[in-house]
Image (spheres, grey):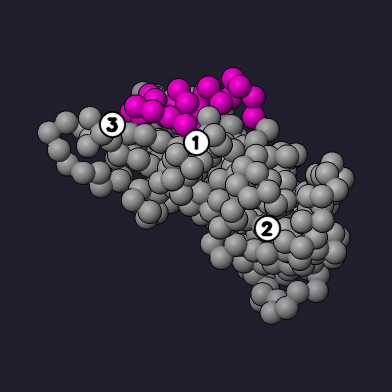
Amino acid sequence: MGVFTEEIGIDLGTANTIIIYKDKVVVDEPSIVAIERSTGKIIAVGKKAQMMHGRTHENIKTIRPLRGGVIADFQATEHMLRTMIKMIDLRKSLFPPALKMVIGIPSGITQVEERAVKESAEQAGAKEVRLVHEPMAAAIGVGIDVLEPVGNMIIDIGGGTSEIAVISLGGIVNSKSIRIAGDEFNADIEEYMRKQHNLNVGERTSERIKIEVGAALNDIPDPPPDFAVHGRDMLTGIPKEVFVNHVEIAKCLDKSIAKVEAAVLDTLEMTPPELSSDIYDTGIYLTGGGALLRGLAKRIEMMTKLKVHIDEDPLRSVARGTSIALKNFDKFKFLIK
């Protein structure tokens, strides 16, 4: 039956779900579904549902089935996975192939939450489901030899969680998982726009502001041009336009970024001295969508006095790691649950 088994690596993220099949990214879609309220029927998944987000009438609702890196809506997650797996052009044969999946999960989730991920994948058609912690998958995806007796520190800032871990000899020596990441940054921007500009903006607009003019420091090389934000004026109720710059966004994100920095310092404090000396030599690896925030690497460098390396494709580090772990299953099997 081995002939009919297909292997896929999945980064089941709060913001995006990425699926790797045969070393290629075959699915990269927002983790969102649109549901018809009257029938409960799911009418769109991924990019199509994202287009509807914040623009629906009362009979359609959009749901993000994962919150803080864990499953908040079991049925929606299962349907989302099933639809995204159908997007893969699997080998056509008389018998549908048995799917073997490796899924990245946050390091701080409970056994109940782990079981929910496994069950969702099984309901979506997986024959065998294995889980790997996201910081470990990200480290493998970045290209670190995680099996060496050398300490490496990885910071993975995703949509729902920020994962900070020190890895050595194929294991996580110590880690911290905090639910302050991309979603929290978006919420900060929404609040700032309300308080400072009397402008009501939605989740999609705050995400766009973060991408266009988001920054972690006031002083950054090649600052982006001011960005025109459209929303509803809270005083008059009329749509209006406001321009924002990176300095304003750096100011509004400061508190949340400070919490991520505190978690990094906590993790460094708990690190055994021999591994600390390794980290001094190797530096810190930064991955996840949060790594793309302008000036964040520089800010962490200034705080820790350590070199910070950003992965060349930080959004896909975890997905790449799950794919490599699948391909070299015998080598990494003790890392995979």
Residue where numbered disc 3 is placed? 98
Q: What's under tag 2, amino acid-wise?
A: Tyr
Magenta residues, start to end: 109-131
Q: Residue furthest bottom?
A: 222
> Quick one: SS at disc 2?
strand
Task: State yes or no: discs 1 and 3 in contact (Cβ < 8 Å).
Answer: no
Residue where numbered disc 1 is placed? 333
Residue for point 58% across, 24% down: 113
Left or right of residue 273, residue 148 in this image: left
User: Picture quarter containing residue 335?
Assistant: top right
> Quick one: SS at disc 3?
strand
Closer to the camera in the image, 76 or 123: 123
Residue 97: give x, y in percent of width and height.
24, 34
Q: What's under tag 3, amino acid-wise?
A: Ala
Residue 192: give x, y in percent of width and height.
77, 54
Residue where numbered disc 2 is placed? 285
* Labels 3 and 2: the sequence-earlier one: 3
Residue for point 54% across, 62% down: 313
